[in-house]
Image (tube, coloured by chain):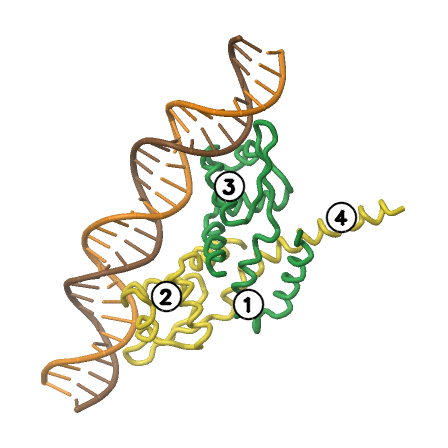
Chain colours: A yellow, B green, C brown, D orange
Amino acid sequence: MPAAANKVFTALADPTRRAIFERLARNGELTVRALTDKAGVSQPAVSKHLGVLKLAGLVHDRHQGRQTHYRVRPKGLAPLIDWMGFYAAFWEDRLDRLEDLLKRMEQ
Amino acid sequence: MPAAANKVFTALADPTRRAIFERLARNGELTVRALTDKAGVSQPAVSKHLGVLKLAGLVHDRHQGRQTHYRVRPKGLAPLIDWMGFYAAFWEDRLDRLEDLLKRMEQ
DNA sequence: CCAATTCATAACCGTACGGTTATTGATCGT
DNA sequence: ACGATCAATAACCGTACGGTTATGAATTGG
């Protein structure tokens, strides 16, 4: 289950890649060309980053003629949420136990 | 704000490091020795990983004699939650619950 | 006191990664 | 038909990173 989280964390660890993802999240759908223009790196670099994001399930691509449109895949962040949710549940347990303890001490 | 997210993502991207973090989350507080015994890597490697986690604000350390106890710093995941803010539309309830929980954990 | 334990640091090593330029395959515009 | 544009791939390069062993500083126990 956390195998997917691995790729997601790795994909989002790089600032350039995360910036690309954020632009896609804001603008909905962009071509490689459009992304390259404001990425600060070369077109091949952008293509590689998009490949990593795609492999991590964070983006989806659509080919139209000679250009490729990329957009965010909504479910892509799910592994991340799930991973954090797991610990949230754990923390809640600890909080619950703490609350129980405090209640018992009140007597 | 995204500078913190950067370190957090990077810190959690490595499987060994994330495993250490998970063990700390489950067990509450552990010494470097205890962590090393089941980490699958050498003690210096564990120490370095803990250094990265600490620098990312994900763990906190407490020195007692010759041993150092590490524990999870609950607020450490906050930058992650913040970063996902622009995704709120998709995650609404789940994100809200996480944010509530983190607020309750604030010291 | 001396030996052992604990942890951090230093020095080093191989590899993976992010970047580049060059190239190729498609596809569009004229 | 042809030149230009777009995107992916290949080949290469420097560096950062995760791992190791070796060493040192501090603390503990017998």
Compute the Cα span from label 2 to label 1. Answer: 22 Å
Q: Is residue A65 left or right of residue B6?
A: left
Q: Is residue C11 left or right of residue B47?
A: left
Q: Which residue is mark 4?
A: A98
Neighbor class of circle 4 (other Cα within 10 Å; few <14, some 14-19, many 20+) is: few
Identify the secondary structure beneath mark 4: helix
Identify the secondary structure beneath mark 2: helix
Look at label 4 and name its amino acid.
Leu
Q: Chain of mark 2?
A: A
> In front: mark 2 or mark 3?
3
Q: Which residue is mark 3?
A: B50
* Residue at image location 43% in from the left, 77% down from the top: A27
Neighbor class of circle 3 (other Cα within 10 Å; few <14, some 14-19, many 20+) is: many
Look at label 1 and name its amino acid.
Gly
Q: Which residue is mark 2?
A: A50
Question: Mark 3 or mark 1, which has the lower sequence index?
Answer: 3
Q: Is the C-beta separation of discs 3 and 1 under 8 Å?
A: no
The spot of residue A8 in percent (x, y) is: 47, 59
The spot of residue A38 in percent (x, y) is: 33, 71
Compute the Cα span from label 4 to label 3. Answer: 27 Å
Compute the Cα span from label 4 to label 2. Answer: 45 Å
Q: Which residue is mark 1?
A: B85
Compute the Cα span from label 4 to label 1. Answer: 29 Å
